[in-house]
Amino acid sequence: MSHLRITGGRPLRGEIAVQGAKNSVLPILSATILSADACRIRCCPRLDDVDAAAEILAYLGCAVRWEGGDLVVDSSRMTGCHIPRYLMEKMRSSVIFLGPLLARFGEASLSYPGGCQLGPRPIDLHLQALREMGAEIREDGGRLLCRARRLRGAEISLPIPSVGATENILLAGCGAAGTTILSGAAREPEIEDLQSFLVRCGAQVSGAGGHTVAVVGKQPLHGCQHRCIGDRIAAATYLCAAAATGGQIALLGVEQRHLGAVCRVLQRCGCTMRHEEGFLALRGPERLRGANIIATAPFPGFPTDAQAILMATLCRADGATMMVENLFDSRFRHVPELRRMGAHIRCQGRTAVVYGVDALHGAAMRATDLRGGAALVVAALQAEEPSAIYEIHHIQRGYEDIARDIRALGGHIDFAADG
């Protein structure tokens, strides 16, 4: 095992390409099941969660191989529809395999998913929607046994814009007889990317990115080549790291409209930004200003995945910032680790107030989850003394090589053996 060693205190400067989006590639990998053909995911990010998805596909009988930076999945000889517990528990989004398995085989057997422990994230919305489409679902010893003699299109309304439920409904709808109309859909850019992939495979899906999505099912699907959008949370991480260190960076392969809420907050804090298609640049001030109040919300609101990262960014800001977490119960687990560096943060329930301090100092810290771990990296880059971050497997679930990218921007970061 290894940990990250970081010595901060210097501005990040330079230009890097942003990896493919983790939250885009995972549902797309599950969607390859529907094609019964070979699909090539170009410039696929090499992440632990991608490895877990590939392992699930291989277990189900798909041929999965890396060709350079592309991941090729051939599901033509796939026969399995049972996913064992040890594979389901490797990532939270593993439930996304339920919709395509039902659509192609009419049955699926899997356990509840794993991943970061951020509080309850029930899959009730997924199950209720699939039941409305004709699936029979029962629980037996912690496993979900699902069968659909005949999936049918339905009019479904989600009470909250769940990203995972939206994706599962789209995928199941591709194999349902008739048309599925989903109201209250999640609007995240990753939903639009999933639609783009499905359309390339021959599916009739429209409306992604809006509140209502339509799927005309039972269309003959085929393989395709697809390149995922840039990862907006990885991009937000590097923008925040540059802002926190008074740096100046440019990111390639990312769309500003996917990061609108994050960019607006950073500009409010004193950063200067400019963008063109597929290009986003930031110049940070000598010292950031507090952002007053930030509340997480579904897209296009401020993303919950960027909350911890921005909190670390504002630990040395001039003034205070109140952060309200509206989506998850346990998303302040990184706060005790930031306090080890001298951060002044008070928490109560789903609200945290960050009071800017003059300086952060180096410390040994533990990543508690994916985005909390990235927040510790951003904090450590602000301290002139060395810091160590342990349990970095959390970070590796969502960042292809965070040390490589930070080094490319002039940061002092590397891996060191535990011991």
Image (cartoon, rainbow, N blue to C red):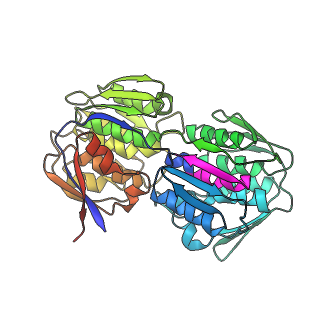
Residue 155, by quadrant, is top right
Q: Quadrant of the C terminus?
A: bottom left
Q: Position of residue 72 (x, y in %)?
A: 59, 54
Q: Is residue 36 magenta?
A: yes
- Horizontally, residue 211 falls left or right of residue 330, namely right
Whether 265 is among the magenta residues is no
| Residue nearest the observer in this picture, 362 or 29 | 29
Q: Seen in the image, is 82 located left or right of residue 252?
A: right
Q: Is residue 125 visible?
A: no
Single out the residue that lies furthest toward the left.
Answer: 385
Whole-percent x, y for residue 40 in the image: 60, 49
Q: Which residue is rendered at x = 23% and y = 51% of the image? A: 413
Answer with left or right where residue 398 lies relative to residue 11.
Answer: right
Q: Which residues are magenta?
A: 26-42
How far across and how far down the image is residue 235, in percent? 40, 39
Q: In this view of the protein, can residue 271 be seen by the observer?
A: yes
Residue at 66 percent across and 36 percent down: it is 208
Vertical position of residue 380 compared to residue 389: above or below:
above
User: In the displayed structure, would residue 366 be above or below residue 197?
Assistant: below
